[in-house]
Amino acid sequence: MPQTSTIRKPLCGANLPAGPCERQAMKNGRCSHHGGLSTGPKSQEARRNLRSRRLINGRHSMTTFEAKQTQQTLAMIMAIIREIQVLSQEEKLLLINKMRLAGIY
Ligand SMILES: [Zn+2]
């Protein structure tokens, strides 16, 4: 059986609803639940590995943005078409007259 150290590591002490966190620190001195965010790769190899990865995903690129706008515009047009479909013949003619006066039909 591996010998375990009897030296108690400092406790986390994070404020929790049930009282302070009593977890002991990991090897790096931080709590496994409340130790904070990663501090990033440490070894030379890990840093090289990270540098070679593509971290930009294109989610906010202009083409995606434009595609979203097009989709929103199409949704709006479809909503207008649905609204027009339920109008009576008389209401449709009134709408066409209004559009003619506004110069869009
Ligand atoms: Zn903790």
Image (spheres, helix red, strand yellow):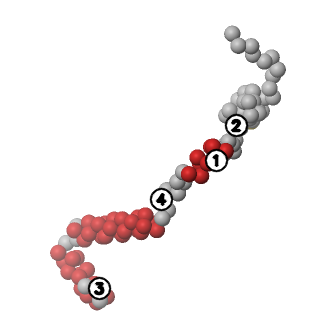
Look at mark 3 in the image and give the residue it sits on: 104
Look at mark 2 in the image and give the residue it sits on: 34
User: Ligand 1 near label 2 (Cβ, under 8 Å)?
Assistant: yes
Rendered-image quadrant of the C terminus = bottom left
Residue at the location (75% across, 27% down)? 24
Query: Could you tell which of marks 3 and 2 lies nearer the N-terminus?
Result: 2
Image spot of residue 97 (x, y percent)? 24, 85
Q: Mark 1 and 3 residues: CB-CB less than 8 Å, in contact?
A: no
Residue at the location (39% across, 66% down)? 67
Q: Which mark is residue 59?
A: 4
Q: Nearer the viewer, residue 2 or 91?
A: 2
- Amino acid bearing label 4: Arg
The answer for how far apart the CA atoms under marks 1 and 3 are is: 60 Å
Viewer-nearest of labels 4 and 1?
A: 1
Query: Could you tell which of marks 4 and 3 lies nearer the N-terminus?
Result: 4
The answer for how far apart the CA atoms under marks 4 and 1 are is: 25 Å
- Amino acid bearing label 2: His
Look at mark 1 in the image and give the residue it sits on: 47
Query: Could you tell which of marks 2 and 4 lies nearer the N-terminus?
Result: 2
